[in-house]
Amino acid sequence: MKRVGVIGAGSWGTALALLLARKGHEVVLWARRPVHASKLDRSRENASYLPGFPLPPEMVITSDLADVAEAELLLVVVPSHGLREVAGALAPHLSGGGPKAVVSAAKGIENGTLRTMTDVLQEELPPEAGARVAVLSGPSFAREVAADLPTAVTVAAQDHRVAAWVQEVMATGSFRVYTSTDVVGVQLGGALKNVMAVAAGISDGLGFGTNTRAALVTRGLAEMARLGVRLGANPLTFAGLAGLGDLVLTCTGDLSRNRQVGLRLGRGEALQAILDDMNMVAEGVKTSRAARDLAARHGVEMPITEQVCRVLHEGFDPREAVRELMLRPPRAEAEFV
Ligand SMILES: NC(=O)C1=CN([C@@H]2O[C@H](COP(=O)(O)OP(=O)(O)OC[C@H]3O[C@@H](n4cnc5c(N)ncnc54)[C@H](O)[C@@H]3O)[C@@H](O)[C@H]2O)C=CC1
Ligand SMILES: O=C(CO)COP(=O)(O)O
C-alpha cells in the first residue's frame, strides 16, 4: 500500500483517485476550491464532474496542499492552463525528500511558453521532485475508468525506473499500464489529439461522412507525428496508446468533450456559447493555439491544426476550412517532414 496524492478533483482526478483507492492505496484527493472539497467530503460523490461513483469513506478529501506533502506518488490532474500555478503552490510543501514520482495526467501545452506539462513541473518543483516527473496518457475516458472497464495507458519518464514504479503502483486487472521513456512523444500525443478531436467533431457536425472522419484521423496523426519527431519524439509513440489510441478514442467517442465542442461548432453554435454551457474543460480549444505556435516556431506544417485554430479563434467558416484542406497542393502521402 502506498500513500498517493491526487491533485485535481475534476472528472479525471476523481476517476484516478477511485482507481487507486480501490487498489488499496491510501488516497488524498485535493480540490482547488474549499467549497468543492467540503461538498465532496459531505456527499462522498463528485456530482459536478463524475456523478454516480461513490467515494470510499477512507479517501481523504482536502483543499490544503500540505495534506499531500507526504505522498509517495503524486498525480497532478488539473487543466493544463492551471498546472503552473498549482505546481508553484505545491513546491514549498515538497522540501523534504519529496515523492518517488510526480505524474502529470493533464493533456495540454502551455499557451505562451509552449512548454509541456512535465517541463512546467520541472520548472516549478524542487529539483529532487523535478527529477522524478512522469506523464500518464492514453485512451482513458474518466467515466469508463471509474466504471472499471478494461483500459490501457502509457506512463513515460526519462528515468525508466520511475515509469516502472508508477506502473507497479497504478496497474490493476482492468487498468493496464505500459511504460515508455518518450516523455515528449507521449505528451504531444495526448495534447494534439484534442485538436484533432475538435476537427473530427466539426466534420461530423457538418454532416460529413465516415470517409471524412477517417481522413482527418489519419492525416491528423501524420501532422502530430511530424511535429513530435521535430521535437525529438520517437515516431512509434504516435502509433501507440498515447498517439493513435487516444486519437481514435476522442475522434470517435461521444464522451469526448473536445469532440462535443467540434460537433456543436459544426452544427452552427458559437464557441463562446458552447464553452459557457460546459462545466468541464476542452483542452483542444487552447491547445490549438499553442500547437500552431509550436509548429510555426519549428517550421512544421500542421494544416488541420491551422484550420481548427481559424475556426475556433478567428470565426472562420468550418465548411470553408474543409474546402481549403481538400484543395491544398497535391503531395505524396508518406513525406514525413
Ligand atoms: N476527463 C477525462 O476523461 C480525461 C481528462 N484528462 C485530462 O485531465 C486534465 C483535467 O481534466 P478533467 O479532470 O477532465 O477536468 P474537468 O473539466 O472534469 O474538471 C476540471 C477541474 O479542474 C479545476 N480547475 C479549473 N480551472 C483550474 C485552474 N486554473 N487551476 C486548478 N484547477 C482548476 C476545476 O475546479 C475542476 O475540478 C485535463 O488536462 C484533461 O485533458 C486526461 C484523460 C482523461
Ligand atoms: O483524453 C481523454 C480520454 O483519453 C478525454 O478526452 P476529452 O478531454 O476530449 O473528453
Image (spheres, helix red, strand yellow):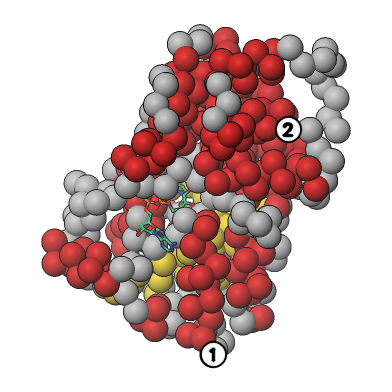
**Exactly how many numbered labels are in the figure?**
2
Residue 189: % across, % down: 63, 42
Q: Residue at x 53, y 41 (%)?
A: 284
Q: Is mark 2 within 8 Å of ligand 2?
A: no
SS label for mark 1: loop
Q: Quadrant of the C terminus?
A: top right
SS label for mark 2: loop
Residue linked to disc 1: 96
Q: Quadrant of the N terminus?
A: bottom left
Residue linked to disc 2: 302
Residue 231: % across, % down: 79, 49
- Residue 29 is left or right of residue 314, and the answer is left
Whether residue 168 is visible to the viewer of this picture, yes or no, is no
Q: Residue at x 60, y 60 (%)?
A: 117
Q: Nearer the viewer, residue 150 or 63?
A: 63
Q: Quadrant of ligand 1?
A: bottom left
